[in-house]
Image (cartoon, rainbow, N blue to C red):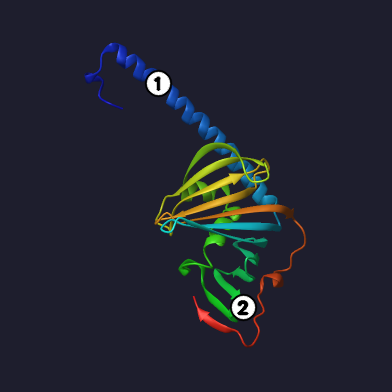
């Protein structure tokens, strides 16, 4: 706030009035954000598995181009460990991505190749969708510890589902500068957007949600044919 010595009494009064409004608004936003995080936390605890349709939009800021990929996703949280993730892309091309124990395999049947590497070191295929899906597995405490969270308002996503929109700014250096989450009334993040340092962005949208069905861990193992070339990612 500017120094009061440079303001008249009337200006001081106005400044204090608007300062009170800002404080009240911040408090209200904090209460709303906490309510959303509480719902996410309860949803996280109750979610034992997830299968869904997935749509990913990758935006190239230099070319101002979007590329859209569609498929299905499987997600299995594990107590005390990172969740298992598998995505089988069907459009425009068939590819499979699995993330297990911080390692990803991206299998491209048409090329007879599999890119294998650590998620933390991934530059492309292993990174975008998994970054977005990772938020589903985070507790309230993890989100608050790792991100500065701002409530951006209410917004309907594709299909008309009403959501709360949150902006998450990492508190420490990461491979992206901000993320946004669209959370439904049950506390389920159904859309996530990750914005990288160069303004490239990956947006992942989940639909046709099937929660808490039976999913075996071997579903997340991609069985590669013998003639597939393995590439270090």
Residue in view at x 42 percent, y 50 percent: 171
Q: Position of residue 214 (x, y in %)?
A: 77, 62
Residue 64 numbered tag: none
Outermost residue to the top: 10
- Residue of label 2: 110
Give whichever of 16, 96 is nearer the camera. Answer: 96
Q: Is residue 225 above or below residue 80?
A: below
Q: Tell me the CA gap for discs 1 and 2.
A: 61 Å
Q: Position of residue 65 (x, y in %)?
A: 48, 57
Q: Is residue 59 left or right of residue 190?
A: left
Give the image quarter of residue 217: bottom right
Residue in view at x 40 percent, y 18 percent: 17
Secondary structure state at the residue bearing disc 1 = helix
Give the image quarter of residue 132: bottom right
Q: Position of residue 54 (x, y in %)?
A: 65, 58
Q: Is residue 90 left or right of residue 37?
A: right
Q: Position of residue 201 (x, y in %)?
A: 48, 55
Residue density around tag 1, few if under 14, some if 14–19, many if 20 or more, within 10 Å = few
Residue density around tag 2, few if under 14, some if 14–19, many if 20 or more, within 10 Å = few
Q: Is residue 80 above or below residue 22?
A: below
Please count the marks in the image: 2
Give whichever of 61, 156 is nearer the camera. Answer: 61
- Residue of label 1: 18
Q: Is residue 171 left or right of residue 44?
A: left
Give whichever of 149, 94 is nearer the camera. Answer: 94
Q: Nearer the viewer, mark 1 or mark 2?
A: 2
| Quadrant location of the N terminus in the rendered image | top left
Secondary structure state at the residue bearing disc 2 = helix
Outermost residue to the left: 5
Earlier-in-chain disc, 1 versus 2: 1
């Amino acid at each position: 706030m500017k120094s009061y010595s440079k303001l008249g009494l009337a200006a001081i009064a106005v400044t204090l009035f608007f300062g009170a409004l800002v404080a009240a608004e911040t408090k209200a936003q904090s209460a709303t954000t906490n309510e959303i995080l509480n719902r996410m936390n309860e949803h996280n605890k109750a979610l034992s598995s997830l299968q869904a349709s997935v749509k990913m939009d990758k935006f190239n800021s230099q070319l101002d181009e979007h590329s859209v990929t569609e498929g299905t996703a499987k997600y299995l949280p594990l107590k005390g460990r990172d969740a298992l993730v598998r995505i089988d892309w069907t459009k425009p091309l068939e590819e499979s991505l699995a993330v297990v124990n911080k390692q990803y395999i991206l299998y491209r049947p048409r090329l007879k190749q599999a890119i294998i590497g650590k998620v933390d070191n991934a530059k492309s295929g292993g990174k975008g969708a998994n970054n977005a899906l990772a938020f589903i597995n985070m507790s309230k405490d993890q989100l608050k510890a790792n991100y500065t969270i701002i409530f951006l308002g209410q917004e309907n996503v594709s299909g008309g589902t009403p959501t709360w929109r949150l902006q998450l700014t990492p508190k420490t250096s990461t491979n992206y500068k901000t993320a946004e989450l669209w959370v439904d009334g049950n506390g389920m993040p159904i859309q996530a957007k990750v914005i990288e340092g160069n303004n490239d962005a990956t947006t992942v949208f989940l639909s046709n949600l099937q929660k808490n069905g039976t999913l075996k861990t071997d579903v997340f193992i991609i069985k590669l044919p013998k003639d597939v070339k393995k590439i270090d990612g």
